[in-house]
Amino acid sequence: MRNTDRWRKLIFELSDQAFFDLVRNYLGNIHTPFNKHTLLDDLEHFLISRKDQIFSMIDASDAALLSAIDFMENASVDQLYTLFKTEVPYCSFYTHLLNLEERMLICPTKETGKHGVVISPLFKDELEKQIIDFDLFIGARKAQPKKNSRYAWYDAPAVGAVLSYLLASYDIMRSDLSFKKKAEEEVASRVGAVNGNAVKDVLLGGSLLTLDRRRLVPDMDKIRTLFSKDIGSFKSFFIRAYLSSDPSAASLYANMRTDRVYPDAAFARLAQCISALSGRQPGDVSAYKKIFLQSGLVVEDSAGLQKLVDDLSPADGRIVVQPDFSLIVQGRLTVDEHMMLAFYSEIREFDVVQCYEITRESFMRGMRSGISADNFTDMLTSRSDSPLPQNILFSLKSWEEECHGIEIYRGCVIKVDSRYSKLLDNNKYFKRYIEKKIADGIYLVSDDKYILAKHELESVSGQRLDLPLDKKRSEALKEPPYMYDTTKLLSYSEPVASDHRQDASGRLLKKLDTLNIPSEQRDILADRIKRKLILSEKQLEDGEVRYELMEARGIDYSRKVRLCQHVLETGNSFLELSVGSEETLLVKPLQLKKEGNDLLLSADTIPEGKSVQVLLRKVRYMRKVRTSLMG
């Protein structure tokens, strides 16, 4: 549906009174006979022709509220107010909302099942180009992006360092076999300022590492999947996994821009937006701020919080291989290369440079993980400016042979006697499924091929065989989800600056003074000018004014009574009541009854729905507030 068609549908669904009041305000008297479709055509043409003037009358508070409405998309009035309740009372907010409706900048809708509002489809595209400004709405400020001065804990070098330390600390051949407090502290100290415990929590929590008795066992399928990601996706995985205990925090972080700084009020507003969009209660904003700062995801200065830029520099680092088996890593390697370092060597220092050491235990651990020893040696060679020391090559070859002296395989073992072994040894179809012939009549078949080998064995033996059930494979690596993610806050187009902001109220009020009209009509038209509903002098000359009792003040008791009775009879308005020096209530009147020499108004407060009773003589000021557009 085109934007203009959607706008026409929304306006056509208004009550007759609201529709005709709207037409009379902008187009003047309605002459009979009339056609509503024709009137709507004329109204559409008038508003489009006056678009520049309508936009010129939008001030900063209008733009902030319009930006909130555009961001929230079909939000109810109550949902919108949650974003502003610390700044303005509900009555002022509600009145402002109605004014935007009357100015045709937003439209009422019941698409959500509740009284909600949307940006007017008639002006939506142009409003987003010229007016909608999320920085104004949220309160964020432009800033130069900031990078981490050192490796962040979610960078591949840091993750690899912590992984190396954890694997070595839990090795069954080592003395520190249990997950003691000392070990936890050393995780962080071994890698300097890196939040080692955060990495540990992600690796263990995501089942990339599992504790089997007193040893950490890596799930190599998941680890390979993780380390095969590009740098950006790798970082994102760890950050999201770290924040996954509170999806609101993950979404809040995801929607912070690196080129913006967020003062406390702006950070709180952003958190409120994420909560409102997801239908959840707002979380503890101070707790979000604390976890972001402690985990090094943001920095704070006098201007506010700023999200750090990910370092996506190319992997152009080098490795200095020393004869004492130490490896000095300078710069950044690929994500996959950091994984090989983690499995084949032990972290010794993590600072400006990373220092590792190849030990017999670490080398064999790397081989047992399924990572090729040739790949590790090739990586060292390609990243080194000089040939590898001969003693290093000799030891690695010796350790590789030693490791192959004892081998453990995972798969299905098939055992047959001599009646079948010769047949199977000469069966070219069966042989293609064999991983290894262990001994005469004993064969190893990989898990993914044993069904095919079983069928061939059944064909040779003429028997139906039942092999052990396949073990349940580990689940694939899952991406921690964001609860809500919106691209609007990350990549919106800033509004085009306009030099046409102007206030025509002074000129229109001067024109109004020249008209020979009754004072009541003059007051109504002056109020419309103040509310920015008058766009041309012709509206003042030809406009049809329907007098309506709107307010009552001070000692004018009879006017207050009539206004209460009118609102009770029509049932389509609220009352704004000032009952003290500072107290103002927005209420829905329910009943007016005698109370001594006064009248007692019973009402429900808006939006709380709390029952109140107010004596009319104690009301300092009373104003009718419409419940919807021109209604």
Image (spheres, rainbow, N blue to C red):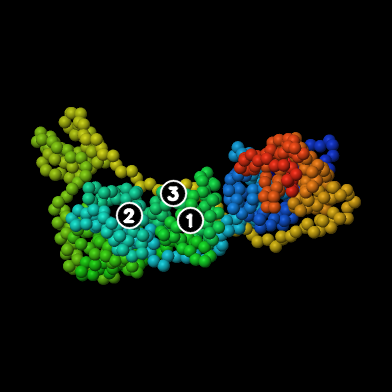
Q: Looking at the rendering, which quadrant does residue 506 occupy?
A: bottom right
Say whether residue 214 is left or right of residue 619. Answer: left
- Neighbor class of circle 2 (other Cα within 10 Å; few <14, some 14-19, many 20+) is many
Asked if 433 appears above or below 194 in the picture, the reply is above
Question: Which residue is the extreme one toward the left?
Answer: 418
Asked if one can make out residue 15 in the rendered structure from this viewpoint, the answer is no
Question: Amino acid under label 2?
Answer: Lys
Q: Which residue is mark 2?
A: 200
Q: Which mark is residue 143?
A: none
Q: Nearer the viewer, mark 2 or mark 1?
A: 1
Farthest residue to the front: give it.
Answer: 596
Q: Amino acid at mark 1?
A: Ser
- Which x, y percent locates residue 213? 22, 48
Q: Which residue position is annotated with label 3?
A: 246
Which mark sits nearer the N-terminus, 2 or 1?
2
* Residue placed most toward the observer, 451 or 207: 207
Image quadrant where one finds the C terminus: top right
Residue linked to disc 1: 286
**CA neighbours of label 3 inside 10 A, class few (<14), some (14 to 19), many (20+):** some
**Is residue 339 visible to us here?**
yes
Residue drawn at (64%, 48%) of the image: 90
**Residue 10 location (% of width, % of height):** 68, 40
Please, what secondary structure does the residue beneath circle 2 have? helix
Q: Residue at x 16, y 41 (%)?
A: 443
Check disc 3 and report its element: helix, strand or loop.
loop
Sequence order check: which comes first, mark 3 or mark 2? 2
Label 3 vs label 1: CA separation?
Answer: 14 Å
